[in-house]
Image (cartoon, rainbow, N blue to C red):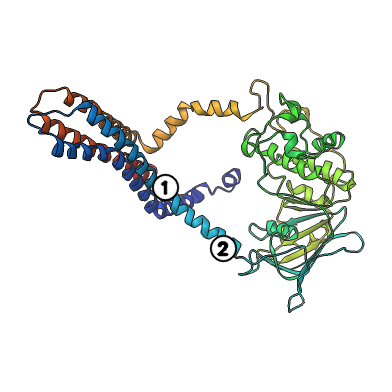
């Protein structure tokens, strides 16, 4: 959002977003109508079945002019009808689940019938192109020769004629315009993208991959970093320091035993990214693949982590691991890498070499805010005292981050200002309509039970009035729930 404001294109992007949102709502309107229909069918089974039962009972078993319904018979029958109606209601709701299940089975079938890509074996094609795992001489970890890669076994290649190497102890930066295939290149090296041509040779026996969206499971910070293996305390401490997590963990009430919650909801975006990075580093891989892992951090923190991990004295350098990193951020750190691979919009390598070698010939680097020389120090980037408090988010003991139960309880109560925002967004008049129809549905669904008790205790001769009123209320409940849900899904929400 900050970039949009800097370029002054908020209005343009807002109009395009609104137009796409309107197209999305128009496309989803049949589905929303289906939801309304399913709910009306559900309500019909619950509300109309007792009414039909009462009508049949009065027609076949009693005289409206001289008799009143017997409470033991009528309420026993209604209890049995309610049990049957609940099953019918579940059947109507199962229609949407059944439809979704068919789509899921189709996707599973497509996956099972897909051609198996066994990346750990040698494939020899008629044109002598293959992907293989083989031991390479010297210090090479990855060698790609004329490689073309694509998702699946059909379609156009996203990356074409790629030729490069990654050596031990080398930091290789992959840069390029948006959508050029930088992330796909890492996945190709990882073996997740099919090699349609050329040769990809892998010598690394252990590979760690850190994606753009950090993966977190509902466990402690320690388990998210180390897994279930034996913990090397000294190495873990060094990794935490290198990923700038020491201070954050010290500020947590239970330190490394803090539960991060589902998908890491207890942590900030920068903290989740650093925990995921620490997990990759802790594994001591021979090859480390990092996909845009520093952009979620502020400039000072990103610079500090880069120097501690990938600087001349960084822990990854000491492991002699090869590193491929997409979009080094902040841009000033790009000059500290050993090699830069510049991709074009069409998925080709435009330039490859050291930063200083390709700076003069690469428009992408010339138009960026990169420094013109390798002036980055190998030591940790100093942090002014005034900025240490804002360099990263901290958790305080006033709001401990230990388990997800505390957050869940606080969220269950909700925020009145949030509800007020939703009400104002759909309009107070629309909210009044929805609330009114909902109240009408509840009243017309419950009041017939009271009406039956009045009828069974009344004098004979007014049976037709009670029967008509009961039937009208049952029909009214179905109409009310249909209007309430329909107004909400079809009119108010869009």
Task: Name the residue beneath numbered marker 2.
Answer: 110
Task: Name the residue beneath numbered marker 1.
Answer: 94
Q: Residue 243 carries which label?
A: none
Q: What element carries label 2?
A: helix
Q: Is residue 184 left or right of residue 304?
A: left
Identity of the residue drawn at 71% across and 62% down: 343
Identity of the residue drawn at 85% across and 51% down: 321
Q: Which of marks 1 and 2 is in front?
A: 1
Q: Which of 14 and 87 is in front in this view?
A: 87
Q: In this view, does 297 lie to the left or right of 318?
A: left
Visible in this render: residue 451? no
Q: Which mark sits nearer the N-terminus, 1 or 2? A: 1
Residue at the extreme right of the image, as rendered: 138
Decide: is 24 above or below 457: below
Visible in this render: residue 352? yes
Answer with the quarter of the image where residue 407 lies: top right
Identity of the residue drawn at 56% across and 63% down: 110
Q: Which of 411 and 460 is in front in this view?
A: 460
For the C terminus, the quadrant is top left
Give the x, y percent position of residue 111: 59, 61
The 10 Å Cα crowd at callout 2, few under 14, some 14 to 19, many 20 or more, is few
Q: Is residue 247 left or right of residue 494?
A: right
Give the x, y percent position of residue 372: 80, 52
Give the x, y percent position of residue 461: 7, 28
């Amino acid at each position: 959002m900050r970039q949009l404001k800097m370029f002054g294109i908020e209005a343009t992007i807002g109009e395009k977003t609104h137009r796409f949102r309107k197209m999305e709502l128009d496309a989803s309107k049949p589905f929303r109508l289906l939801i309304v229909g399913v709910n009306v069918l559900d309500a019909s089974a619950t509300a109309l079945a007792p009414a039909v039962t009462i009508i049949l009972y009065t027609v076949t078993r009693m005289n409206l002019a001289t008799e009143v319904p017997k409470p033991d018979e009528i309420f026993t029958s209604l209890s049995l009808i309610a049990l049957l109606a609940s099953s019918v209601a579940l059947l109507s709701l199962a229609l949407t689940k059944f439809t979704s299940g068919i789509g899921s089975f189709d996707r599973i079938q497509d996956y099972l019938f897909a051609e198996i890509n066994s990346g750990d074996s040698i494939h020899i094609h008629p044109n002598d192109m293959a992907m293989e795992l083989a031991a390479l001489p010297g210090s090479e970890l990855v060698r790609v020769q004329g490689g073309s890669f694509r998702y699946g076994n059909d379609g156009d290649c996203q990356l074409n004629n790629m030729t490069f190497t990654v050596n031990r102890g080398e930091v290789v930066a992959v840069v390029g315009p948006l959508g050029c295939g930088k992330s796909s290149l890492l996945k190709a090296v990882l073996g997740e993208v099919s090699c349609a041509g050329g040769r990809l040779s892998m010598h690394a026996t252990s590979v760690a991959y850190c994606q753009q969206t950090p993966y977190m499971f509902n466990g402690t910070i320690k388990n998210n970093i180390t897994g279930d293996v034996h913990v090397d305390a000294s190495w873990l401490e060094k990794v935490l320091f290198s990923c700038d997590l020491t201070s954050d963990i010290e500020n947590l009430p239970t330190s490394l035993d803090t539960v991060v919650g589902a998908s890491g909801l207890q942590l900030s975006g920068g903290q989740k990214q650093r925990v995921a990075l620490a997990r990759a580093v802790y594994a001591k891989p021979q090859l480390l693949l990092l996909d845009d892992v520093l952009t979620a951090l502020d400039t000072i923190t990103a610079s500090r982590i880069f120097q501690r991990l990938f600087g001349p004295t960084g822990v990854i350098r000491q492991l002699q691991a090869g590193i491929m990193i997409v979009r080094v951020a902040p841009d000033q750190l790009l000059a500290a890498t050993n090699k830069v691979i510049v991709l074009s919009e069409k998925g080709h390598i435009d330039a490859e070499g050291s930063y200083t070698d390709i700076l003069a010939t690469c428009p992408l680097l010339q138009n960026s805010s990169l420094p013109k020389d390798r002036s980055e120090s190998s030591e940790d980037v100093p942090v002014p005292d005034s900025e240490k408090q804002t360099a990263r988010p901290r958790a305080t003991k006033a709001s401990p981050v230990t388990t997800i139960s505390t957050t869940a309880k606080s969220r269950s109560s909700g925020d009145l200002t949030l509800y007020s925002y939703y009400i104002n967004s759909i309009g107070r008049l629309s909210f009044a309509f929805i609330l009114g129809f909902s109240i009408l549905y509840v009243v017309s669904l419950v009041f017939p039970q009271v009406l039956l008790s009045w009828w069974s205790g009344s004098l004979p001769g007014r049976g037709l009035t009670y029967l008509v009123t009961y039937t009208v209320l049952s029909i009214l409940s179905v109409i009310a729930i249909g209007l309430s849900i329909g107004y909400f899904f079809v009119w108010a929400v869009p």
